[in-house]
Image (cartoon, helix red, strand yellow):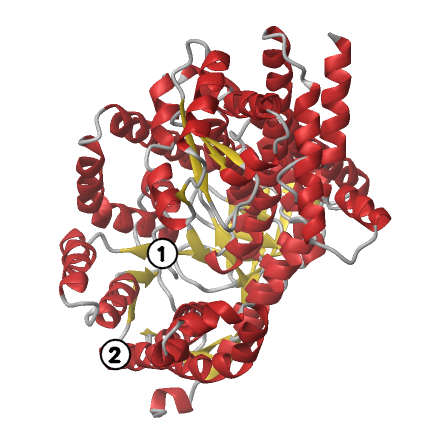
Amino acid sequence: MISTRAYYYDGKSSRRYLVELSLDAGTGIKITGDGVSVNYDPSQVKVAAAVGSQARAVYFPDDAKCELIDDFPLEDHLPKNNPVFSFIHRLENRWRYLVPSLVIVVASFWAGFEYGVPALARQAAFILPEETSSRLGEDTLAFLDKALFKPSQLETKRIAQLQERFRYMMADRQYQIEFRSSEKMQANALALPSGVIVFTDGMVELASDDEELLAVLAHEIGHIEERHGLRQVIQNSMTAVLMILVAGDITSASSFAATLPVMLMQMKFSRQFESEADDFAVHLLLKQGLDPGKLATILGRMAEQVDDETDNENEADKKEDSASIDFLSTHPATQERIAKINAASLDQ
Amino acid sequence: MKNIATISSKELPFEFNGTSREFFGIWIVNILLTVLTLGFYSPWAKVRTKRYFYGSTVLDNASFDYLADPKVILKGWIIVGVVLMAYNVGSNMLPVLGPVFMLVFLLLMPWLVVRAMCFRMRNTAWRNIRFSFEKDYREATKVFVGFAVLVPLSFGLLMPYFAYRKKKFLMNHASFGQDQFELPNMGRTFYEIYLVLAMIFFGSIMVLAFVLPEVMSPLMMKVNPSAMNHLSEPARQVMPWALPVVAGAFFITIVISYPYLQASISNAIWNNVRIADNRFNSTLSTWKLMWIYQTNTLAIMFSFGLLVPWTMIRLARYRIDNLTLLAASELEGFVARATQHENALADEASDVFDVDLGL
């Protein structure tokens, strides 16, 4: 027979009894002391799974409870009703298990964000009907016209000429090409999920020939055809769900803390979309017998224009910057993109 | 305003003895198993977390106990998942269903709140005596549907009263054993609390409106003088600052108001509630809570989430260490009620829909 000190609560009042809990193969569990004397059948008691270093508790069929005062190997003497949790409790309390656990958790989150989320979002985006994607950006142009854009200053003749060239590239695609001028946005082009592609006047002026603009158009078509708008929405909501999983019941005051990783992920996803659109453009341009190198040329010129604006920094510094803040930017480093495009066009 | 009961009372502090080191293990294993089981472990994870926090909260040498069965929570969690999916799919296919669902949800709200409270209270125990919650659906409907509709109609003037009625409802229907918690009428206190909140907001507008132009005007002139010169004289005074001033005031108010409401409402409630002649003393400070929240946020951001367990323990410790029971007599006399079982469905549902039950 072995015994240990315990507090006994009868479940009827909040009174605490200091008792001795003894286990015996013949008579079962016996609780004595402080005016208490009860016996229980070991097969009917419930041993609560251990949590941390908290006192172990045993629950009895008549709603009474014992809380052990000293360390006592309950599992060795009572029926193991939760072997899984004894194992989990061991995991939780030894660094040699926690370090691998941490590594697995970090690795699976990394893999989830790197491959799982993008792949699932891609699947979902292409399962959903086309109209889900196009409905996303319906009002965006109207909004941008109010907030950012002014009517294009280009000659009507020039616009018509470009529309004609673009129409040839688009073949049977039903996209709408718009030209706008903007003070804040210089040389730029953007694709809205609804199938509208906007060129800024700055973009048209920056291009040294129309083939460069066709290369930009191919890139923007890539964004639409790969449903990047919709995929972004899906990926962002999946990221949010995963964050809640980690954070558990984080209060709303700390929820700002969860927005930083989500933001970083969004930037990463956005860079992935840019390279995907580049790949798409290279293929499309090659198929139409155009030079994909033109995309690299215009990208390089866009980067130069940005560099000119941020003066008093020497060339070396700039290169270093564009590499080191890669994870903070929405577009991959231009040099990298150019190299990739050139490599892809040589491959063909 | 001490009365005779408190003078002869004994101070019994609530103590929190959980440690970040120990909880880190529970937390990381919880995430690991949740990931490996594709989410199905999460009820067990929730129960282990709660058991750790409840078990680390000690009053008069006895800790609290969380007794919920994870399988019951899992069941509720699956039902909630199915309903949410039905809602998502349904409202996408047939947009009319969206508002219908919302209306149904509003009407179900009192039931959900009551059920969630029953589940939570019933699964909380101290010295093997369980808490319980009275199923008063009538009063719940009055508070959670009636007032929820009246508040916007009163242009928010009823907001503090609504906040008070919610707390009163939750407190006055809770019992420990056979003894009921009793919260006296204190609508006035809530109005005072919200008045201070309004003063923080307007005060920060005043300060910002005064300070911002002084600091920013010369700067603006330097960066973009042409934009400034286009404006007429009064517009130049007001226009550029209106937005940053209001935004800044909102920011300050949000940063301060959350800990302020937490501290002042918790203090007000615990300092007034009684149970069988026992009273409480709560000494939370807005500034300390604000410090904890803000530094917790920074810690989580810069540790990529790894310090989440530390922040949870730190907050729990501060809150619990600032509560004291003023016991009228020895705490041996509480008597249990006949037992009954609740389902976890409502508990999970209110978790997902994020109803603030703030107890």
Neighbours of disc 1 within 10 Å: few (<14), some (14-19), many (20+) = few
Marking on residue B356: 1
Marking on residue B181: none
- For the residue pair B219 and A156, the one nearer the viewer reads as A156
* Residue at image location 39% in from the left, 87% down from the top: B6
Which quadrant of the figure contains the N terminus of chain A? Answer: top right
Is B202 positioned to the left or the right of A229 in the image?
left
Which quadrant of the figure contains the C terminus of chain A? Answer: top right
Quick one: SS at disc 2?
loop
Asked if both marks, 2 and 1, belong to the same chain, the answer given is yes
Disc 1 marks which amino acid? Asp
Q: Which of the 4 image quarters holds residue B297?
A: bottom right
Quick one: SS at disc 1?
loop
Q: Is residue A58 above or below residue B101?
A: below
Q: Is residue A150 above or below residue B252?
A: above
Seen as rendered, the residue at the extreme right is A316
Is A4 positioned to the left or the right of B96 in the image?
right
Is B316 positioned to the left or the right of A294 in the image?
left
Residue A199 location in percent, x, y?
49, 33
Residue A189 location in percent, x, y?
52, 34
> Would you name the residue on which mark 2 appears?
B186
* Residue at image location 66% in from the left, 30% down from the top: A298
- Res. B321 visible in picture: no
- For the residue pair B80 and A170, the one nearer the viewer reads as A170
Disc 2 marks which amino acid? Met
Residue B328 location in percent, x, y?
40, 81
Q: Which of the 4 image quarters holds residue A93?
A: top right
Is A321 positioned to the left or the right of B14 in the image?
right
- For the residue pair B227 and B137, the one nearer the viewer reads as B227
Q: Chain of mark 2?
A: B
